[in-house]
Every structure is written in C-alpha cells, then in structure tokens.
Amino acid sequence: MTANLPILLVDVLGSVFMVVLGMLSLFKAKSLRDLDPDNVVFLYLIWICAGFTIFAVSRSFSHILRQFLVLTGSGDIWNSIGPFTGAVNTISFMLVGTVTLFFNQSWRINEKVLSAKQKHEETSAKLLELNQTLEHKVVERTEMLTSSEHKARRIFEHSLDTIVVTDPFFVFAEINQAGVELTGYRKPDILDNKMGLKDFLSVRSEREKILNLLETHEYILNEEADFLRADQTFVRVLITGGVDYGAFGCGKTFHFIIKNINDKKQMEQQIAQADKLAALGELSAGVAHEINNPLGIILGYTQLMLKNPGEHEQDLKTIEKHVKNCRTVVSDLLTFARKGTKKMHAIDVCKVVDDVISFLENHSDFRDVKMAAPAPCSRALMVHGNEQEISQVIINLMINACHAVAKKGCIQVEIACHDDKWIHIAVKDNGTGIPKKDFSRIFDPFFTTKPVGEGTGLGLSVGYGIIRRHGGDIRVRNRKDKGAAFTITLPLLASSQEADPNREEMRQ
C-alpha cells in the first residue's frame, strides 16, 4: 500500500488536473465563441473541448472510483463495473476522434463565412458611403428647393402687379397683396367666397373674349379690360395669363399677371386731350382774331345808328345784342387760346370760393338749390393765380351742377389740402351724372349736352385751359350714389405751407 502511494496520488491528482484542464479549455473556447459567434472554428473548438472534457470527467471518475474501491477492499465491485467505465471512456474518446474528422469542413465553412462577412462589410461600407452621399445631395437639393421657393414666394408676395392662381374654372386659389389692393376685397373673402375672374370682368364683351381665348388657346397676352373693384369703381387693367399642368402634368391651373394701367390710360387721355385742345386753341385764336375786328365795327356802327334809331330801333337793338353775344364767344375763344393778358398773384382760395357762393346764392337759378358750402377756413390757402379766372371756373362748374340737378337738387362744395402741396376744390351734385361715352369729350370746345341755344360748349374747355395755365388739373367722375363730381387741383403756395406745415384739412 505504502509503495503504491505515489502512483495513487499521481493517478488521482492527474485525473483531477485533466478535468480542470478540460473545463478551462471548454471555458476558453466558449469565450472565443462569444467574441465572434459567426466563427465556425470557434464552434469547432467548443465541440473538441466538450468531447475532451467529457472524456476527462469519465476517465477521472473511473480512476478515482477504482482507487477508492481498491483501498476500501471492494475490488470485486470494481471488477464488475470496470468494463462499463472503460466502455464509456472509449465512446468518449471515439466521440472526440469523430469530431476531429470535421475539421477541414469546419475550416472551409469558416473561410466562406469570413469571406462573406468581409464582402458584407465592404458592401455595408459602400452602402454607408452611398447613403451619406445621398443624404448630402438630399440636403443640397432641399436647400436649393427652399431657396427657390423663397425667391418665388418673395416675387409673388412683393410684386407690384397682381399675381393670381386659379383653378381650371378660373376661381381664385391664390392672390398676392397687390391683387388684394387692386380688388379692394379682403383675401379671406376672395378665397372663402370662391370669387373668380368672371366676378371682376364686368364688361360682358371683354369677359367673353378673354374666356374664349383661354378656352381655345389656354393663354392670353396683354388683354385690356375694365376690372370691377369692391367699391363698384372700374380700373383699367392689362391681363396676361396661361395654363400650368403642374410638375406631374395632372394639376391644371391658370396663372395670371394683372397690371393696373389706369393711371397710364388717364395720362394718355390727358396728353391726347392737351394735344387736341392745343390744336383747337390755335384754330380758335385765328378765328377770333379774324372776326373780332369786324364785330367791333358792326357793334360801333350799330351803336352809332342807335343814337338816331328811327323806325329800325328794335332791329338795331337786336343786332347789338347778338353782336355782344358774339364778342363774348370770341372773348372765351381768346381766353381758351391763352391770348389773355390777365396778371396773376397770390390769392386765397377760401375767399374766392366764399365770394362765388355768396354771389350765386342770390341768383334766381339757385333759388331752389340746396348748397352745402365749406366750413370757414382756419387759415389762408394761397395759390398763385388770377382771382377772376378762378372764380369764372368755379362759377361755370356750379352753373353746370345747377343744370344737372334741374335747379332743385343739392350742390356740395369741398376744399381739401393734401400734403401741404396741393389744394383740391370739389363741386359735387346729386343730378343724373355723366354718361360714360361723354367722358372723353367733356372738355372739348363746343361740346355740350344742353339743348340748342342754352350753351356754347366753351365753359368747361375754357375752365380746363385756365386751370392748366395755373399749373393745376381738373378731373370729373360720377359719384358712387348719384350725380357727378368735378375736382380742381391747384399747387399751394409756399406761404401757406409755412403758415402750418403739418396741417391737412377738409372743409365741407
């Protein structure tokens, strides 16, 4: 027993050490497997280590059990179970040996897995780079799109011309601020009430022409039309527009640019009127010069003969009356032709208007006319002009207003000071107004709507010449409710501005 003790210890300790070594190998193989679960070699090592561990445990258990049974005198028991433990050891060892047969296959599988993994990583890197490039391009395109949209939005919102987007039936879908100012409606009212191009083109012939062009050619170019505003006034506009089918060709809309040419048209009319009046003025001056002297001779001889009239006194008086009328017409023609020599100086417009109203209040034609005079001026509104001529123009306007109300209506006179640079004198009546067809001829010489014998047609044309010679303007319009309104505009003298530079007033 004592002689076999070293061998016994070596056998027991060797068995324990072999089990520990097998467990450590299995633990290490598992650690490698956890680091790279896709590595088949590491899986193979787990199988090998597991087989060796099972073999070590089986063999160590059988050796320790044999030593224990021998030392305890139970060698018979060992003899009976010894073959079984040997069989277990053999099977364990065969298992390990079988596993080693799959090493080459495991290695090739692992190489394929590693190759596939490498390709996968390269593909992932390319995809990542492509994705980053794509994201960069998306950011770049988004910035360009945002910038382009911002520019388009600024052009749309800040354009001085009206820009309108409509649906296929010309109902407004979008309108810019200039369009809101042109129409006079609030933007929500236009969009919520589904107002369209047809609502603003009030002249039937112009509306039908524009809509026919749009339906036929899907565009219009510089078509003029009267545009109806919210306050029922008209503005002359120039319309250009066309169809848009959208980015994908399935969203049909119409885009319009509407330009306000009202001021331009009025300027053209004024220039044409000035040219026409200049030509007529030259003609009138020539005619007046040629007949003024003969009229003077006829009047002189007639008045001479009236000193001893005899039986022809009534005839001579008739001749004298009509010659004087002719000389009045000639005088008006000379005034219209700017042949007068009347001096101009600083005059107070308020005083001129008050004097005119006081004069006309005593006139029989104004007996049944209600005149609304302006309130007393708080300061002198001075202009450089001829008081007699200014009075003549205002009197003519008020006489015309009196005829317009059939001598029994209401005439309103207003005085307004604008920006301390201009003064406006308005004469308004509640008569029948002026037909639209007569607006272009209202200041023409010899044009009158009065019956034959009741007017020469020179009052407004002479008044127009006087106001233009004073550096001002005279305009006419029909009032919203009823009647017409003539407005005289004259430049205010600097002395009035210095008297009260921040003042803006309206007297009525």
Image (cartoon, rainbow, N blue to C red):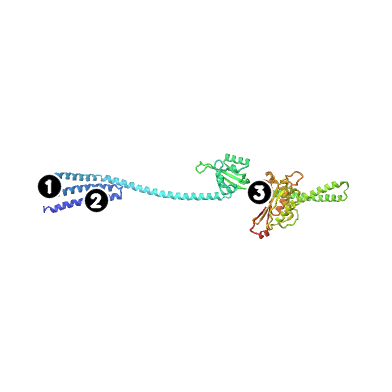
Which residue position holds label 1?
75
Mark 3 vs mark 2, CA separation in Å: 106 Å
The percent position of residue 189, horizontal first and vertical second, equals 56, 45
* Pointer 1 local density, CA inside 10 Å: few below 14, some 14–19, many at least 20: some
The percent position of residue 280, horizontal first and vertical second, equals 73, 48
- Please, what secondary structure does the residue beneath circle 1 have? helix
Q: Which badge, 1 or 3, comes first in the chain's sequence?
A: 1
- Please, what secondary structure does the residue beneath circle 2 have? helix
Amino acid at pointer 2: Ser
**Residue 458 in view, yes or no:** no
Q: Which badge, 3 or 2, comes first in the chain's sequence?
A: 2
Amino acid at pointer 1: Gly
Mark 1 vs mark 2, CA separation in Å: 34 Å
For image coordinates 23% across by 50% down, the residue present is: 23
The percent position of residue 72, horizontal first and vertical second, equals 12, 49
Residue 89 image label = none
Work out whether residue 460 or residue 418 is closer to the camera in this orientation and state it.
418
Work out whether residue 459 or residue 190 is closer to the camera in this orientation and state it.
190
Residue 25 image label = 2
Amino acid at pointer 3: Gln
* Pointer 3 local density, CA inside 10 Å: few below 14, some 14–19, many at least 20: few
Circle 1/circle 3 CB separation < 8 Å: no
Work out whether residue 369 or residue 168 is closer to the camera in this orientation and state it.
369
Which residue position holds label 3?
266
- Please, what secondary structure does the residue beneath circle 3 have? helix
Tag in front: 1 or 3: 1
